[in-house]
Image: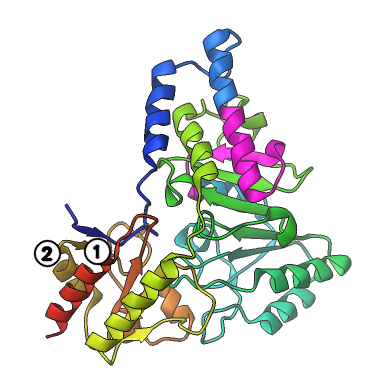
Amino acid sequence: MATAYLDHNATTPPYKSVIELVARVMREGGNPSAVYGVGRQARGRVETARSQVAKLANARARDVTFFGSATEAHATLIAQFASALFLRPDSEHDAVLNSRPGIPIPLKSSGVVCIESLKNLLYSNSGPILVAIMAANNETGIIPDIETISQLIISAKVNNPKIHFHIDAVQAAGKFPIDFKAWGCDSLALSSHKMGGPQGVGALVTRPGFDLQPIIRGGGQERRRRAGTENVAGIAGFGLACELTEDMDHLIVLREHLERGLNAINPKSIIVGQDERRLPNTTCVINPGMSSEILLMKFDLAGVALSSGSACSSGRVGGSHVLQAMGINADFARSSLRFSLGRETTKAEVDLALDAYRDICS
């Protein structure tokens, strides 16, 4: 077992009160589609969570649909636009990139979306367009200028109302405020286990009146948007986690301590996106001449849990597609590590990681 768990962007340990609630709801039982008492109680759990998720996102509860994961939420949304032009950066999560072929929105070398390139793509096409952009990158922590992107898309919709703007807010939620209404998007995906909730639950928020068609068909659950009996306990835990989210700005001090230490130990190390707005908990560091795979094994032996990028790649360790989308060469992309801190991460854990790095580099 890791002595220092520094991979919170992969999955965040659930709040203790969330674990307790999930256990309690599992003991209660009941199918939320049943009309008798225990069924109505289960339904109440689901609808309470729906309101909690909606409050976190600044949206209406009726526009929140629960899924088995954010990946399923993305897939369901993207399936609605099979014939649309699909625009997304090549730095998106695999759940979006692998959903269907698309046209990449170029990135600047700093890792943020090139606004001028997006504008050209939007105004040079008149048919249906789906735009998908992360509110915060899961590997680098870089936060794009969502407000400017939103205003650009809103302006483009004047001439082309067939544009749909989808935001992947999986890594953003619980780390900084998300705002469905202010961002002006048409849909937004969330994941429970990235913010202190249980695994196996995701949500999709859609604009009022959007006709979301299911890709999993069967019963009439989730207003006929997603068939299958709801994961009541997981959904209840998700809702509570939304209420418990905290400001993570205090982690900036710890992140900066980590980054100063990494650069001091290995002056050749490169902090990705250091001059851009980033998540307060995330550090992506390139270690020229070193292998991510070997580094991860050595950190693991030292009791430090890290990753080299997304945890959704079946355990593979390879060149980061995110870094390559930023124009970073493949050799550098194969030498990166991601440190992602959590609400309970201590300085002692960070120092343990730095000690391990010092031993590795010596």
Picture quadrant where residue 254 is located? bottom left
Spot occupied by residue 142 in the image (x, y as percentages of width and height): 51, 73
User: Disc 1 designates what residue?
Assistant: 349
- The residue located at (35%, 60%) in the rendering is 313
- The residue located at (38%, 43%) in the rendering is 14
SS at circle 2: helix
Spot occupied by residue 315 in the image (x, y as percentages of width and height): 27, 59
Q: Residue furthest right?
A: 158
- The residues colored magenta run 46-71
Position of 280 relative to 221 (above/below): below
The CA distance from mark 1 to mark 2 is 15 Å
Tell which tag, 1 or 2, sits nearer the viewer.
Answer: 1
- The residue located at (69%, 54%) in the rendering is 180
User: Disc 2 designates what residue?
Assistant: 301
Magenta span dominant secondary structure: helix
**Quadrant that contains the C terminus:** bottom left
Picture quadrant where residue 261 is located? bottom left
